[in-house]
Image (cartoon, rainbow, N blue to C red):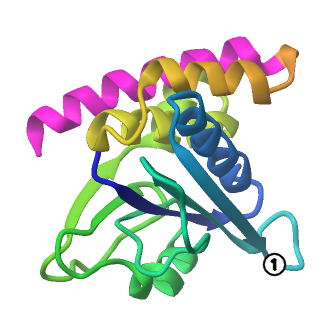
Amino acid sequence: MGAVKQIMLCGSGGQGIVLAGVMLGHAAFKEGKWVTSMNSYGAASRGGECRAEVVISDRPISFPHIIEADILIAMYQIAYNRYIGRIKREGGIVIYDDRFVSPEEIEGLRYVSVPATRMAIDRLNDRIVANVIMLGAVAEITQVVTKESLECAVEENVPERLRGLNLKAVEIGSKLGIEISGNT
């Protein structure tokens, strides 16, 4: 990973975007990185647009907000449409849930489709963990954090009754990310 990575996660309320941002930041912190994060969501907690910003660095962070995202993780079309303008035009990576996002590709960006929601439903019979499957895939595709640090973040941020399900989601996402990385 370079000195600083600016990551924006976006989606619709109820998709676990804020929790995903917290877990991503927690995972990076566990790896000894410097981390800042910020969350934003609309008036409606379910169905309103939301985002999480995470800045990860090997050194102290001088400005805690995203200036230009290196990575955009999009889980919902309306949020993607709103935040695509905030990504670095040369070398930026857009990782999106293929069930809810159909991007019009922009030159200079790398697009990676991840079937996070489909896998959550098909493999775990619970769409609520699509966000964690996405994080597992993102970790493998970008190497921004490790699978092991994500597992630690789940252990420390997810209620006990949901930990097993979320740890399975990390595993599925990680395997998916490895498979996708071989194809991109």
- Is 3 placed left or right of 86 in the picture? left
Between residues 135 and 26, which one lies in front from this camera angle? 26
The quadrant where residue 18 appears: bottom right
Query: For the image shown, how many numbered marks are present on the structure?
Result: 1
Q: Main secondary structure of the magenta part?
A: helix
Asked if the magenta segment contains residue 87, the reply would be no
Q: Position of residue 2 (x, y in %)?
A: 28, 52
Q: Position of residue 135 (x, y in %)?
A: 49, 39
- Is 60 placed left or right of 179 in the picture? right
- Quarter of the figure with the N terminus: top left
Q: Residue at x 31, y 37 (%)?
A: 143
Give the structural element (helix, strand or loop) at label 1. loop
Q: Residue at x 41, y 27 (%)?
A: 146
Residue type at mark 1: give it.
Gly
User: Dot 1, crowdedness within 10 Å: few (<14), some or many (≥20)?
Assistant: few
Question: Is residue 41 positioned above or below 153 on the image?
Answer: below
The residues colored magenta run 162-184
Q: Residue at x 30, y 78 (%)?
A: 88
The residue identified by callout 1 is 42
Q: Position of residue 79 (x, y in %)?
A: 56, 76
Q: Residue at x 44, y 23 (%)?
A: 147
